[in-house]
Image (cartoon, rainbow, N blue to C red):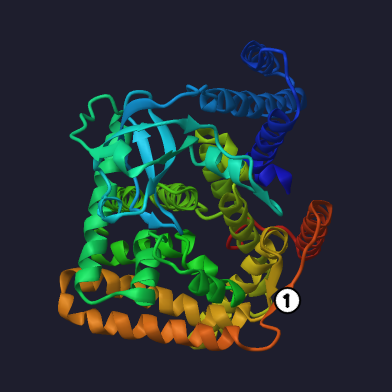
Amino acid sequence: MAEKIPLLRLVVFLMTGIVVGEYVPIQVPMFPVWVVMIVVTLLLWRHRYGQSLMLCACFLVLGMLLILRQKESLEVVWPESEVCYEAVVLSEPVEKPKTMAVDILLPSNHRKLKCYLYKEERSRRLRIGDGLRIQSRIKENSDWRQGSFDYRRYLEIHGFTGTTFVSSWKWQKAEIFLKDLSRLERARLFFLRQRSRLLQRFSNQGLDGEQYAVVAAMALGEKSALTKDLREVYAVTGASHVLALSGLHLGIIYTLFSLLIVGRRWRMVSQILLILGIWVFVFLVGITTSVVRSAVMLSTYALLSLGHRDRMSLNTLAFAVMILLMMSPSSLFDVGFQMSFAAVASILLLVPLLDSLFSQEFLMEHRLFRWLWSLVAVSCAAQIGVAPLIAYYFGRFSTCFLLTNLIVVPAATLILWLSIVVLIIPSLAFLLIYIVGLLNTTLTMIAAIPGASIPLHPTLLQVSMTYVIIVAVIAITILTVGWSPSRRGW
């Protein structure tokens, strides 16, 4: 069984190395050690098992090396006094009790900061791409914690190296030259500006309040407009995943692009266009971890489809995770990354088992039942994968997740498609407003059901043991029914 998913084994060692590098003090320079281990691995080409063990050890050391290098890159000593500097706004202003919060980038040293400006009309009017000239003191990231949430780690995972609070008379808008930014940073800034314009178009079509907040989150990944009450409704009902761009959303976009790009005679060209379209969307929504993971998986899926090979599998997932961790090893400690990985892995393992409860002939004859069963199977599999993490990080378990997913998944598909249509035909905005309003009302009613959410507060050990039990049960079941590479997902 393990031989059929070699990349998954390597990813496990890579993850282990990242964890060791994060928590264990290491005084030995890791790069020379890693190079020596690679040479030894190549020399063992005649010894299959010895080479396999050394290859796993190489990925273990690679994980340690990557996390240590990222930690070093985030280390910066800020001056004790106020300094003058130029910055570029990377996010829309978010209103806090006394300030307006924006993410800024310093072109001079490529550092990202959390910036809190005094709340006034000027700070409210800031937009992505605006240049600022600021005089303030920059502080290290706060060590604030609440339960299992570590704010400092959250900031470091997302690349923030400091925080600054700026008085109203110590900043002004300025023309900033972006030549010092990398091409990737300039491209990201360009697409963020385009997203801001698209959001403004939604607002101009009459979307406001909760309807605008949901469309902005689902279609373009902008969650700053979501209120605390609305987030709570979606969390209690187990529908939070539709507000965070993930594989569900990218799958819908991929399907839409597939319908628009018809090219069976030019299959390679059409698949390349699909991949380009997916990555344009990734940049448009801000290159978040879950979207990049989904984009890597879909890109691999599209490329493998050219050779009619097994496409969506644990190896594909492992490849996507490997790419993400090599780009940003600290993503391993991100809640979104963990939940995304757990959900997809659970779907790939459990859905084929659940599908085997019915014969293929029966499912082909009853297409409506097949669609409903597929939705139920995916929802149950994903919930099994993420439930321990949700309980650990958020202290709850939604008992209505199955009912909720039967509603929100079709609704999310319709909302995403209508969002694109409304950008082309603004007069149809009333349909989008009605559907989003109906979805919000339905979820509010479900959230009001007694027992819709059960409070749970497991320890890290309990969560770990829960996953050990889940993996053991899945492994025993697979060995019992027999391993078959032809099964979907395996």
Q: What residue is at 36 percent from the left and 61 percent from the top?
A: 254
Q: What residue is at 51 percent from the left and 32 percent from the top?
A: 139
Give the percent coordinates (x, y) of residue 387.
69, 65
Give the percent coordinates (x, y) of residue 55.
68, 26
Q: In the shown orientation, is residue 358 left or right of residue 466? A: left
Up-down relation of residue 249 to residue 338 (above or below): below
- The amino acid at mark 1 is Ile
Give the percent coordinates (x, y) of residue 116.
42, 45
Quadrant in the rendering for residue 14: top right
Q: In the shown orientation, is residue 86 left or right of residue 81? A: left
Residue 344 or residue 305, whichever sits in front: 344
Up-down relation of residue 160 to residue 478 (above or below): above
Give the percent coordinates (x, y) of residue 424.
16, 70
The outermost residue toward the front is 169
Dot 1: within a 10 Å radius of its alpha carbon, few (fewer than 14), some, or many (20 or more) residues? few
Residue under circle 1? 454
Q: Is residue 282 visible?
A: yes
Q: In the shown orientation, is residue 243 left or right of residue 376? A: left
Q: What residue is at 25 percent from the left and 54 percent from the top?
A: 125
Up-down relation of residue 345 to residue 375 (above or below): above
Q: Secondary structure at mark 1?
A: strand
Q: What residue is at 32 percent from the left and 44 percent from the top?
A: 168
Residue 94 or residue 379, whichever sits in front: 94
Quadrant in the rendering for residue 362: bottom right
Instruction: Work out which quarter of the rendered image holds the C terminus and state it.
Output: bottom right
Residue 308 or residue 96, whichever sits in front: 96
